[in-house]
Image (tube, rainbow, N blue to C red):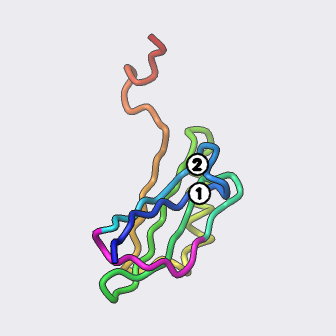
Amino acid sequence: MKRQEKMLHGNRNGKKDGVAIFTSGKKDFKTKTVTRDKEGHYIMIKGTIQQGDITLVNIYASNIGATKYIKQLLTEIKGEIDSNTIIVMYFNTPLTPMDRSSK
């Protein structure tokens, strides 16, 4: 049986911008639950890989209000986070003055 890569979107239809999580077909990842917000700013996937539980979380935070949004979201999902959780975030924040340049 050939294993296939999977892509799970933060938004429901996958046709607009939002976060996504790709899983490799080389590992036997089995999805149990998928939780996401309406805007596609985060997705949380609970599953198993090699007989072990794992939770994958991908969060997008715009540079306006990012700190407040991340704090609120992490507070909401704190009961879902454990030592087998991987959290990835995209802050969309310039790191240097050159990053802010429009030229």
Q: Is residue 29 above or below residue 42?
A: below
Q: Residues within 10 Å of mark 1 (few under 14, many from 20)?
A: many
- Numbered disc 1: secondary structure: loop
Overall secondary structure of the magenta section:
strand
- Which amino acid, by three-letter code, is at mark 2? Gly
Q: Is residue 33 magenta?
A: yes
Residue position for label 1: 10
Which quarter of the rendered picture does the C terminus lie within?
top left
Which quarter of the rendered picture does the N terminus lie within?
bottom left
What percent of the width, then of the height, locates residue 45?
Answer: 51, 71
Q: Quadrant of residue 73?
A: bottom right
Q: Is residue 37 above or below residue 31?
A: above
Q: Earlier in the sequence, mark 1 or mark 2?
A: 1
- Numbered disc 2: secondary structure: loop
Q: Residue shown at 42%/58% (left/top)? A: 88
Q: Is residue 100 left or right of residue 67?
A: left
Residue sitting farthest toward the right: 38
Magenta stretch: give its range.
26-34
Q: Is residue 89 left or right of residue 83?
A: right
Q: Is residue 39 magenta?
A: no
Q: Residue shown at 47%/36% (left/top)? A: 93
Q: Quadrant of residue 29?
A: bottom left
Q: Is residue 65 above or below residue 30?
A: above
- Which amino acid, by three-letter code, is at mark 1? Gly
Q: Quadrant of residue 56?
A: bottom left
What percent of the width, then of the height, locates residue 8?
Answer: 52, 61
Q: Residue shown at 33%/72% (left/top)? A: 2
Q: Are marks 1 and 2 in contact (CB under 8 Å)?
A: yes
What percent of the width, then of the height, locates residue 57?
Answer: 48, 65
Disc assigned to residue 18: 2
Q: Is residue 61 left or right of residue 100?
A: right
